[in-house]
Image: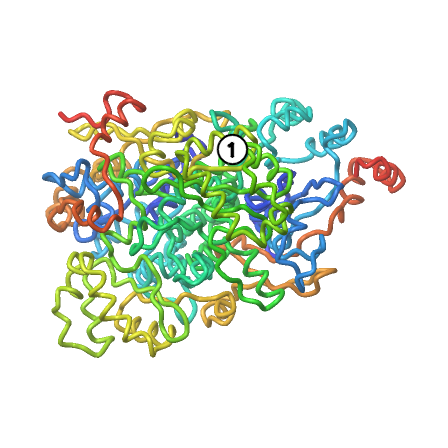
Amino acid sequence: MAYKLLDGIRILDLTMVFAGPVATKILAELGAEVIKIESIQRADVFTRANVYPENEPGKDPWNRGCLFHTLNAGKRGISLNLGSEEGREIFKRLIKISDAVVENYSPRVMENWGMGYEELKKIKSDIIMVSISGLGHYGPLRDFYMYVPGMEGMSGLTYITGFPGEPPLLSGCAYGDWVTGAHAAAALLTALYYRMQSGKGQYVDVSGREAVACHIGEILTGYTLNKQNPSMMGNRHASAAPHSCYRCRGEDSWVNIAVENDEQWQRFCKAIGSPAWTAEERFATNRSRWQNQDELDRLVEEWTIQHDHIEVMQILQEAGVAVGAALNMKEVNLNPHLIDRGFFQIIDHGDGIGKRPIASQMPAKFSEAESFVPKRAPRFGEDDEYVFGSLLKMSKVEMEKLAKDKIIGGPPTFPRGRPTRTDLIEQQKAGWFDPDYLNELREKHGEDLGQHG
Amino acid sequence: MNEQAFSGLRVLDCTQGVAGPYCTKLLADFGAEVIKVENPQGGDGTRSTGPFLKNEPHPEKSGAFFYLNTNKKSVTLNLESKEGAKIFKELVKRASVLVESFEPGKMAELGLAPELLREINPRLVITSISAYGQTGPYRNYKATNLTVYGTGGAMYTQRPGTKPTARPVIEGGFQAEYSTGVLSYIATISALIKRDNSDKGISVDISAMECVTSTLMGHIAEYSYLGLSRRTSPFAIHGYPIGYSVPCKDGWISLTPGIGGAPNIAFLIGKPELQDDPLLADTRTRMANPERFDALLIPWLKDRSKWEVTKEAQELRLAFTPVLSPEELLEDEQIKAREFFAKVDHPVMGEVTYPGAPAKLSGSPWQAGRAPLLGEHNEEIYGEIGYTKESLAKLKKKGIL
């Protein structure tokens, strides 16, 4: 579900791939009008070209990539070549009628185009401009090339993630990009709130690496206090046990259990039927359990392995113990709690793809605000007519001329649509496939899901 | 002092731990007057959580509490007592925002249900942060950062590309909590913007499980569009060899050959004859042969340091980056040039250095400040609503403050 809180706010979105689109997806879910700008020469290829419905790229693969849909639903989309002088002039006309612009080009690009903050401010004095980059827009390393491993690795987060003795681990979900996008959205809203009070716009410089470092603030502060580098703790707690991820019955099935004090331990023991070892002296106190946790973890797993991970969650929750099954992507998509709360956005593609659930990027429920279901992500150049025709009042003739010069219009320059290598994923065990996924989803989300025709 | 976004905005903060305090810390760092309401028996539990200065447990020496509560004011109040709840309602009258992280139903139990609070302050924005939200079958589930990381789905993906069925390992620190904190901040400001335009208070219900699921982005859609349940990073596509850190002379380095081909690797490792080798030039060949790629790079990296390799690779437009420890982060020239770390004085801890702004705002900037001592602002805040020093002493004796 999404909510109309930012009615009347218009945001120009020059971002691509993950971090920037997360920021503007959050804003679109809050009801802002986000206009995503791509061009024939430069489309958001990485997300548009990855993971097609039913693994079929189709005749217009650029409109089918599911990563693009999940990060751009609810936005409008236009095609405008900012590499041309004419395109930049049109962009400046859009600035006049917009509240904010978000970009994630390499530092320098916007300035080289005469579209830096100082220039945009001359066109619209209260414009808010947000620049997103890996290491920030000034400083000696600002031109570093990096993706999510840089944002995580150079923040200190990777250094503390993993099992002792093993290589530090990159996040499984491009988390550094997500954090960057969330903080870019947060900063834009902070600037917007300030503009409501003061009438003033401003420039925002978001460094992904710094945003991620803020999410391990207590650990970095711990370092500055005592000058001791932290070590990787795996799944362990600093002072309590059992506290880990345990194997359950079935293939690749896991559960997280967190027992943080003696009272919880008593409840845990009772719930698992008080086997003899739970009464042993070495497990009697938080401290002794923590000291003997290699052995403790082994014994706890002897119990969890006998049960399905959902079963373990139910048994221990009933006893009031903090436990959470490590749900896989199928289980998340079909999760009764998430469905009950309206977490998923069921976006409608029509066109042979039908409806599909995608994850909300702004999962909050608001009272006193109108809710809505976001429209599917824009097809390439879908809103050219609305933006150039209705908003900028261009004539048909003018638009046709621009399209002929490839300044607006489509289709984008795009690599041949290639299916995902499902054989490699299976061979390398990077994931597994559920052949019945459409029926499974229909049972939970409705019959018109994934319908062809 | 610079103007700030939330100057003049008063926030009541009834949160503990990480998620709620991170949300209100951001509000405070951007100028809001945040009044943290702590229980008189020791306050926020984070005060007894490390890391501590000199590793000595002490309620005013926790680095975690410090970082998560900068720029706030602290009052003590026992909300479990009738008189405490009554005083709280007086504070509510003078606030714009309340952020709370009690278990669902607890506010109502204390006689402080959102509906009641809005009767006394119709424009109040109330942000309720919990593990599973205020509704739904899991709403009363017990949870910690570790367990919601599991149910949110992120845990399942936390494995190296090379070992996709190994035991998952949680992201370091408290990422389920921080994710929830930043989204709570976003939700709170959005509600404030709407309130200022409509004049009606708003309640916000935010769940940590859902925030964790949001961080998964494409993983969720890969199931609904393709039936795929992925076990690792999306960048570890078919063993695309960046899903893990590679050892070098003085630690670890992340290799990201780029979304396209990376023929420049041939020049980096001094084997220009390999530039047209599909292993380097073609993404899909590299993806299908992670072992061959490692065999080429790992021996070369063994004798070179992370910064030496990074700088050479960056010259060749290769996105190779070092894995930095906290110590190395503080020494990073970019971090220094941008003055990322802030320094402030604290009456008990002395000078504290801690991570600064998550984003640099030119017009209404983030500001440094210290965390409050427990109950440090009792006189100031309760004085405003008519309590004298003597009456406060009495309340303290009764265990209400």
Near mark 1 (Cα within 10 A), the count class, few <14, some 14-19 or many ≥20, is many
| Rendering coords of residue A235 (x, y %) | 48, 50
Q: Locate residue B388: give its quadrant.
A: top right
| Rendering coords of residue A447 (x, y %) | 24, 20
User: Looking at the picture, does residue A93 appear above or below residue A451?
Assistant: below
Q: Locate residue B118: give its quadrant.
A: top right
Q: Is residue B66 left or right of residue B311?
A: right
The residue at the far top in this view is A447
Q: Secondary structure at mark 1?
A: helix
Q: Is residue B193 left or right of residue A384?
A: right
Residue at 13% across / 64% down in the picture?
A: B278
| Rendering coords of residue A119 (x, y %) | 37, 57
Residue at 26% across / 53% down in the picture?
A: A88
Instruction: Please state which of residues A324 and B382 is positioned toward the viewer in this rendering.
Output: A324
Residue B70 shows in this picture: no
Looking at the rendered image, the quarter that the C terminus of chain A falls into is top left
Residue B237 shows in this picture: yes
Looking at the rendered image, the quarter that the N terminus of chain A falls into is top left
| Rendering coords of residue B168 (x, y %) | 39, 49
User: Looking at the picture, does residue B381 appear above or below residue A216?
Assistant: above
Provide the chain ID for the residue under circle 1.
A
Instruction: Tell me which amino acid carries mark 1.
Output: Leu
Q: Locate residue B321: give its quadrant.
A: bottom left
Where is mark 1, residue-wise? Answer: A316
* Colouring method of the image: rainbow
Instruction: Please state which of residues A392 and A226 is positioned toward the viewer in this rendering.
Output: A226
Residue at 33% across / 55% down in the picture?
A: B160
Instruction: Please state which of residues B212 and A138 is positioned toward the viewer in this rendering.
Output: B212
